[in-house]
Amino acid sequence: MIAVRIWVVAMCVVASRAAAHDAVDAAPAAEATGIPAESDLSAAYRDVTARILGAALASDQGYRRLSELCDGIGHRLSGSKALERATQWAAAAMRADGLENVRLQPAMVPHWERGDESAVMVQPGPQVLSMLGLGRSVGTPRGGITADVVAVRSFAELNALPAEAVRGKIVLYNVPFTNYGTTVRYRGAGAKRAAARGAVAALVRSVGPTSLRTPHTGNMSAYTDSFPKIPAAAVTIEDAEMMQRLLDRGERVRVRLTMNARMLPDALSHNVIGELRGRERPEEVVVVGGHLDSWDVGQGAHDDGGGCVASMEALRLLKALGLRPRRTLRVVLWTNEENGLKGAEAYRDSVKADIARHVAAIETDGGMERPKGFGVKCLLAPSDSVDATRQARARARMQAIAPLLAGVGASAVDDNGGGADTGPLMRLGVPGVAHHTIGEKYFEWHHTPADMLDKVDPIEFRKNIAAIAALAYVLADMPDRLDDGPVSGTH
């Protein structure tokens, strides 16, 4: 009954004025620039997007499929057997959905294994600390490392300490969360910066706003040859604050860290690709996808199982509705986003010679909370600088499409487009589109054992699928390209 009520509401909101889908071919451009007025795209696609939204909101297929991935396979670290089971599962699902050109694209990926690990505060104590080793970290010597802890709240504070205050110690980065981009620097470079001051290990406060003693793992940046490779692990906010309080009182804090982490030779993995071939311009492509790998804790439900299943489900719904856009819609489930981007690089290399035929690349890697909208970004190839002219055109078209997504709350448009896996395509000139949710809880679960399927609300998941499917269809079907880019050659 809930699904039926949502479907009716969506139909009432989005389909307030019906318009025939065939009218798209005759919709005139409103400006000499070729950018259609909002009314043109909105009117032309109102009826068809209402059908897409209604079908998505009425279906629980996506959530059941996400359960197959999360509950049936679980977490999927790069190089693991679980990840390869997931690639086979996804390819089989795409074939069952009737997608075309389903294939596995090989990529050699890093293979890091966590092994057994523990951290114990032996003085005062003993007290077991909740921890997770950081990806790419080396292990400890046999028997672990036992050393005094020195706590800092910034790299500047670390650098200001005298050499004897750091040498032979374990550095604890007790850095409160401000935003992910700022705070994650300590996870990435903390071990190298501590090693440069003579530390024997690094502990990093979990990168998130709050926790229930849930440590946050993630990838470190590569070690350098200039300083020793020291082990690094995340500890919870609660444990970091406990050690800070003890140190602030003048007490000695000693921790025994034991890690059996190791890097193995690169392993064979695969991107999973399937298509809904275009009816008029099959050589032009709109990509939509997420990354299939995850960290080796939790189930990778929000990061990024939900994005993968939503992308798969978008094409399944269009196929089931008998909707075939002008251009080809291609779902790509990338491998190795979390600790290498080797899947993204392999895909880029496979299409590089004909990159101008990529009309847009939609990435969904921000979880499946309540949908908010989409960002768009057009870069000057080959760089990370924005192409202002193409950016204005693409944003105008996204704003013209946005009212069609208001029924599921996804009508916001900003300039924060793209993502990690679409980045290599964007630097070759492909417009990048990012799916955005409200993100209220995402970083509480991100890279922790809490990223489980129960955190994905089934109704909000349907809304995200609806928004992704509708936007992907319009981008692939509308007469003009998103940024007025060329059909052949290079941007």
Image (spheres, rainbow, N blue to C red):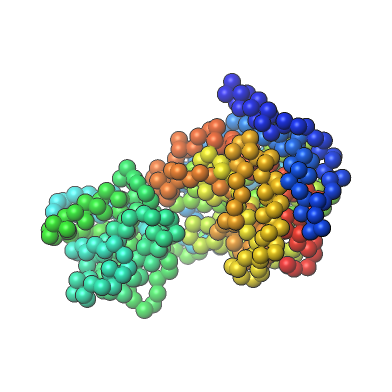
Quadrant location, the C terminus? bottom right
**Res 343 quadrant in image:** bottom right
In this view, the residue farthest toward the front is 31
Q: Is residue 473 above or below residue 115?
A: above
Task: Decide which of 209, 334 is in the foreground and name it.
Answer: 209
- Residue 305 in view in this figure: no
Residue drawn at x 27%, y 48% is 238
- Residue 473, x across and y down, in percent: 72, 44
Residue 357 placement, left or right of 201: right
Give the tally of numbered discs.
0
**Res 407 quadrant in image:** top right
Residue drawn at x 26%, y 73% is 160
In this view, the residue farthest toward the right is 26
Residue 402 placement, left or right of 39: left
Task: Decide which of 387, 37 is in the foreground and name it.
Answer: 37
- Residue 29, x across and y down, in percent: 82, 51
- Residue 267, x across and y down, in percent: 52, 60
Residue drawn at x 64%, y 71% is 382
**Res 422 quadrant in image:** bottom right
Task: Decide which of 119, 16 is in the foreground and name it.
Answer: 16
Residue 255 placement, left or right of 135: left
Residue 171 placement, left or right of 465: left
- Residue 4 in view in this figure: yes
Residue drawn at x 38%, y 51% is 208
In this view, the residue farthest toward the bottom is 226
Quadrant location, the N terminus? top right
- Residue 419, x across and y down, in percent: 57, 57
